[in-house]
Image: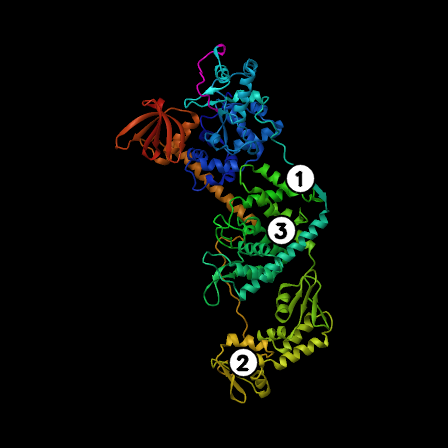
């Protein structure tokens, strides 16, 4: 190339703000803390950890193109297109991605991969790594390599192929490497004498990249690098998928509400590790009518949405309690509530599918433990849903073969890691189905909108699939009430106070029983209020048996009063007390009569009340003033976690990220202006030394470093920097005529050798 930049830092300085902002947004590790200028930004982009994160974002095609850049050395876009076995347009697009991510840059000698990339490229063909070595500094032409290959014996050709398949390195034992082709006595000497293998100083021989390219037909890979795995499909119909997903979304929201309503009055204890006990998870599964993995998913999703957090129980013990955000959540429409849960799941690094499995130490994972996170789970969920979004809306992955094909496609998109990608894709598919993001294996319309960040459209799409909340129920003579659709939340909570849920589904069936009516009376309802409520919510006249049930229960309610003795029982109905005193099952209560209308016992009230209700009585608590005390359970709440996404939209999160990038961009540009106006410093800070040394490595420039040795002596060293890692510089010291290591914190100045 006739033009280019002296270093990556110079290239970043020349970029327009829009392109530099794209780099900062896509490589988020570069912005925290904000780099001082473009030099420090370029230095940070070349660190091993940053390179590894950037490579993890690439698909197999981009990794293959980057690998081809490493093999070619300084090259041109046209040559890269010729080296990669893929469509030219796809290769050029991948090359643009690499340049935008600063994984490759335009030097005066041509395009080249960033220093450190060859060491960071690991894996095999499935990870886009060809296994070819870089070309020699003075490479043979393809014609010369072909001619010399034709001169080899069969044994030498077989050996060369074996070295290529083994990764391009081998040992040759006693083979001579200074002989001419005519003097070669062994296959290894045949290859060394023709420069088809090259010996390194450590004695290992490598196969030059130009030879490997000829052996592979001029391409770095044998298989096409742009072949995205296909997903076998079957027809289901978009409407059927949407309805199935809407039904699952309805059940997920209903179960989360039921769980948190229950835990608001009877919160489960929190373990010392911060997790949820196995027994409490099993109880939640029974309550919700799901298996334990399903209950773990709902518990984790509620916590991720900021609706559940660690707080204090009734005895000030650590417990899992609904947050104050839950009260705002239940006031939203059904589709908006689903949106909060689904977005929290989509953006959560939690691994609920691991709950119940064993960790490496053999201990079972508990729900809500802090360690239950995966660095790649968020990415895997999105990639799985994106693979489904690429299918026709009327098609779903075929049974049996569809999921493995989705795994293959996701692995093509991100081939480097993690190792358990197949398992994570399966988890994402199962969890998305349970939460109503997908239905029958296909992506729903509201799931598709949520994935695209169009949350309002997702709410509207789900609203269109759900029936309107009903405000009335059908009361029947068998003491049941049928809700012909989803009840409005306030009505559902009031109805649940006086009736028990008998069955759920499209139509929920409630059953009225004496204990359920007594429960309402315990909460402070009067008989008149119960009758008024039933008249209001019934679409038909209230059946006579239900009216009789309310009146009969209210008539006996409070005929026995309980107070502190440890406890006493008082009633104007001597017969009622006599029945309790002589009941066969009341012997363990230790009741004794002290007056015709008064019994006392040593049993505490909190134990006595439920036992009396089991015996058929309807007691109420009496205060010291003789008034009835309503024993309504207190709803416990805790403050939501700071930084919870429950109340933040995807747009707000994106805007915050853009603001952070804009701030860093301004800081880098200001630092560049300050550096240009600043005279050369006599000393260099460790941070600036790192920047200058990385720039010297990129440009392959000889520098003079001011260095303080371990004895405290200052001196200048003329060094060719080779590698920088962990605060240690490996470089060729001209005075020592050897590769030495230098601690960067001992470097007090760096300048080009030509400026001495």
From the viewer's perspective, tell me whether residue 394 is left or right of residue 203. Answer: right
Q: Quadrant of residue 173?
A: top left
Q: Name the residue under label 2.
A: 587
Residue 634 on image: x %, y %: 52, 69
Q: Is the magenta stretch mostly helix, strand or loop?
A: loop
First reached walking from the N terminus: tag 2 or tag 1 = 1
Q: Name the residue under label 1.
A: 231
Q: Alpha-carbon distance for marks 3 and 1? A: 30 Å
Q: What element carries label 2?
A: helix
Residue under the point 37% across and 27% down = 731
The boundaries of the magenta stretch are 170-182
Q: How many labels does the image show?
A: 3
Image: 83 above or below 461? above
First reached walking from the N terminus: tag 2 or tag 3 = 3
Residue 496 on image: x %, y %: 62, 68
Q: Is residue 342 magenta?
A: no
Outermost residue to the bottom: 596
Outermost residue to the top: 182
Residue 132 on image: x %, y %: 52, 26
Q: What element carries label 1?
A: loop
Q: Is residue 177 magenta?
A: yes
Circle 1 crowding by C-alpha within 10 Å: few under 14, some 14–19, many from 20: many
Mark identifier at residue 628: none
Q: Relative to the observer, which residue lies in front, 165 or 50?
A: 165
Q: Name the residue under label 3.
A: 456
Q: Alpha-carbon distance for marks 2 and 3? A: 62 Å
Q: The C terminus lies in which quarter of the figure?
A: top left
Image: 724 above or below 292? above
From the viewer's perspective, tell me whether residue 199 is left or right of residue 578. Answer: left
Disc 2 versus disc 1: nearer the observer: 2
């Amino acid at each position: 190339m006739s033009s280019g930049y002296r270093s990556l830092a110079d290239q970043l300085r020349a970029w327009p703000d829009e392109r530099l902002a794209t780099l900062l947004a896509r490589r988020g590790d570069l912005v925290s803390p904000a780099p001082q200028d473009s030099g420090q930004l370029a230095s940070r982009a070349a660190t091993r950890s940053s390179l590894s994160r950037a490579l993890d974002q690439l698909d197999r095609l981009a990794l293959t193109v980057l690998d081809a850049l490493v093999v070619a050395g300084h090259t041109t876009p046209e040559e890269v297109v010729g080296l990669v076995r893929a469509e030219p347009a796809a290769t050029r697009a991948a090359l643009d991605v690499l340049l935008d991510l600063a994984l490759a840059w335009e030097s005066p000698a041509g395009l080249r991969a960033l220093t450190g990339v060859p060491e960071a490229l690991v894996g095999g063909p499935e990870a886009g790594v060809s296994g070819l070595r870089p070309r020699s500094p003075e490479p043979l032409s393809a014609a010369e390599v072909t001619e010399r290959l034709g001169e080899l014996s069969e044994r030498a050709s077989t050996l060369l192929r074996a070295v290529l398949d083994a990764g391009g390195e081998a040992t040759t034992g006693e083979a001579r490497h200074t002989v001419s082709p005519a003097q070669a006595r062994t296959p290894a000497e045949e290859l060394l004498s023709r420069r088809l293998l090259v010996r390194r100083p450590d004695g290992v021989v490598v196969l030059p990249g130009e030879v490997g390219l000829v052996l592979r037909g001029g391409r770095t890979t044998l298989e096409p690098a742009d072949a995205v795995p296909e997903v076998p499909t079957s027809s289901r119909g978009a409407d059927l998928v949407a309805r199935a997903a809407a039904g699952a979304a309805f059940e997920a929201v209903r179960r989360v509400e039921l769980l948190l309503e229950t835990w608001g009055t009877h919160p489960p204890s929190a373990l010392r590790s911060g997790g949820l006990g196995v027994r409490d998870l099993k109880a939640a599964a029974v309550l919700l009518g799901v298996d334990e993995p399903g209950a773990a998913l709902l518990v984790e999703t509620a916590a991720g949405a900021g609706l559940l957090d660690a707080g204090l129980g009734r005895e000030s013990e650590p417990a899992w309690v609904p947050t104050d955000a839950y009260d705002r959540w239940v006031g939203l429409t059904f589709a908006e509530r689903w949106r909060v849960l689904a977005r929290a799941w989509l953006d959560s690094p939690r691994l609920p599918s691991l709950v119940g499995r064993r960790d490496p130490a053999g201990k079972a994972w508990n729900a809500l433990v802090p360690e239950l996170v995966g660095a790649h789970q968020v990415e895997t969920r999105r990639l799985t849903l994106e693979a489904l979004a690429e299918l026709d809306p009327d098609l779903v992955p075929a049974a049996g073969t569809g999921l493995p094909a989705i795994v293959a496609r996701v692995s093509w998109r991100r081939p480097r890691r993690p190792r358990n990608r197949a398992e994570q894709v399966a988890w994402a598919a199962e969890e998305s189905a349970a939460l109503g993001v997908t239905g029958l294996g296909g992506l729903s319309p509201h799931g598709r909108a949520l994935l695209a960040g169009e949350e309002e459209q997702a709410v509207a799409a789900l609203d269109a699939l759900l029936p309107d909340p009903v405000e009335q129920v059908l009361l029947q003579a068998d003491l049941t009430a049928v809700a012909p659709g989803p009840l409005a939340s306030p009505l559902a909570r009031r109805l649940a106070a006086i009736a028990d849920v008998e069955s759920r589904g499209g139509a929920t069936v409630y059953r009225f029983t004496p204990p359920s009516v007594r429960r309402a009376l315990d909460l402070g309802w009067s008989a008149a209020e119960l009758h008024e409520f039933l008249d209001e919510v019934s679409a038909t006249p209230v059946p006579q048996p239900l009216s009789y049930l309310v009146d009969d229960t209210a008539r006996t309610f409070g005929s026995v009063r309980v107070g502190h003795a440890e406890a006493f029982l008082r009633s104007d109905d001597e017969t009622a007390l006599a029945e309790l005193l002589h009941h066969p099952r009341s012997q363990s209560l230790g009741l004794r009569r002290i007056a015709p209308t008064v019994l006392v016992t040593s049993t505490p009230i909190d134990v006595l009340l439920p036992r009396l209700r089991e015996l058929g009585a309807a007691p109420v608590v009496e205060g010291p003033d003789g008034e009835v005390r309503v024993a309504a359970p207190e709803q416990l709440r805790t403050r939501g976690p700071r930084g919870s996404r429950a109340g933040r939209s995807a747009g707000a999160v994106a805007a915050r990220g853009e603001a952070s990038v804009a701030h860093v961009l301004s800081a880098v540009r200001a630092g560049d202006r300050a550096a240009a106006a600043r005279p050369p410093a006599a000393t260099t800070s460790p941070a600036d030394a790192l920047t200058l040394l990385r720039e010297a490595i990129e440009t392959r420039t000889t520098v003079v470093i001011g260095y303080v040795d371990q004895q405290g002596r200052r001196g200048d060293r003329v060094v060719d920097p080779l590698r920088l890692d962990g605060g240690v510089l490996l470089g060729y010291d001209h005075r020592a005529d050897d590769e030495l290591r230098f601690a960067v914190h001992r470097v007090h100045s760096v300048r080009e050798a030509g400026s001495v």
